[in-house]
Image (cartoon, coloured by chain):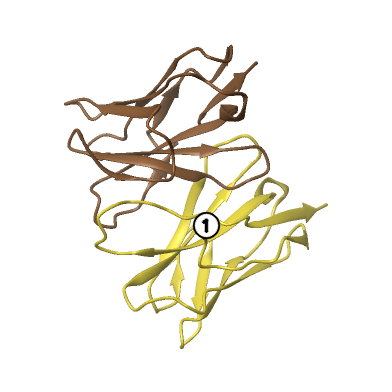
Chain colours: A yellow, B brown
């Protein structure tokens, strides 16, 4: 079973910031938080990952709480093309496999 | 573009038949994993290959099998197809199995009739 819980769906106005929450209260010390998104009928796209510090790249920012039990993915200026299912995944570093356990994700609908 | 390419993009098979799906990993990536995604669900891990050996498997029966070749390309084979095998099959590659970022291809849509 997935170790994360996310809202089923969210709406965001185009041009505004989209803040997608994720709870991972049972995360272990060696587990990273990864975010992927999947636009309809395409393969999952890597967005960002982090361990305990906040991270930013050209796509998004990741804010992880100090106790690491939750995180927020921020898309600073959402566009219609950001409409997708967003998956939050915890993943151990140094494990034997690259197994990712996907939950049901959050369907983000960006409205014009 | 992730550099992970899959073929075919769509195919239709009849129940009981066998299917082979192919994947070309991102350059330099020696680890490949396969996922099955049924309609409306998240991807489910099938198995992983590292340096041509299977080194991890999800909850899938033995009729799901794979190969990884010396150039790190990979195949997923499914025998005795069932209607429930209809899904999007995703290939993912990474630099190794220890935690580097995993990149997915666009998938192969399989319909079993």
Q: Residue furthest right?
A: A112
- The image shows residue B53, relative to residue A13, as above or below, that is above
Q: Chain of mark 1?
A: A
Which residue is located at x 63 percent, y 46 percent? B41
Query: What residue is shown with label 1?
Result: A59
Work out whether residue A5 or residue A44 is closer to the camera in this orientation and state it: A5
Work out whether residue A31 or residue B16 is closer to the camera in this orientation and state it: B16
Residue A16 in the image, given as x and y percentages of width and height:
73, 65
Q: Tag 1: Cα neighbours inside 10 Å, few (<14), some, or many (≥20)?
A: few
Which residue is located at x 31 percent, y 73 percent? A30
Residue B92 in the image, given as x and y percentages of width and height:
39, 39
Residue B34 in the image, given as x and y percentages of width and height:
40, 37
Residue A95 relative to residue A67: left or right: left
Which residue is located at x 32 percent, y 28 percent? B66
Q: Residue furthest bottom?
A: A66
Residue B69 relative to residue B37: left or right: left
Residue A16 relative to residue A23: left or right: right
- The image shows residue B62, relative to residue A72, as above or below, that is above
Residue A39 in view here: yes
Residue B106 in view here: no
């Amino acid at each position: 079973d997935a170790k994360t819980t996310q809202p089923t769906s969210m709406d965001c106005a185009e041009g505004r910031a989209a803040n997608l929450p994720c709870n991972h209260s049972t995360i272990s010390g060696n587990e990273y938080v990864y975010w992927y998104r999947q636009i309809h009928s395409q393969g999952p796209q890597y967005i960002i990952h982090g361990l305990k510090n906040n991270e930013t790249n050209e796509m998004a920012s990741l804010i992880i709480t100090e106790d690491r039990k939750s995180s927020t993915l921020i898309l600073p200026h959402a566009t219609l093309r950001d409409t997708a299912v967003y998956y939050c995944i915890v993943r151990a570093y140094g494990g034997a496999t690259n197994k990712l356990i996907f939950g049901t994700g959050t369907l983000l609908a960006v409205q014009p | 573009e992730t550099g992970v390419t899959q073929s075919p993009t769509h195919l239709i098979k009849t129940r009981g038949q066998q299917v082979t799906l192919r994947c070309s990993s991102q350059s330099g990536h020696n680890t490949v994993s396969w996922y099955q995604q049924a309609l409306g669900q998240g991807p489910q891990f099938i198995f992983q290959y590292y340096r041509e050996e299977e080194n991890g498997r999800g909850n899938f029966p033995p009729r799901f099998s794979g190969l990884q070749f010396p150039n790190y390309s990979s195949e997923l084979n499914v025998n005795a197809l069932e209607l429930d095998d209809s899904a999007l099959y995703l290939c993912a590659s990474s630099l190794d199995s220890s935690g580097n970022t995993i990149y997915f291809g666009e998938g192969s849509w399989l319909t079993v009739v």
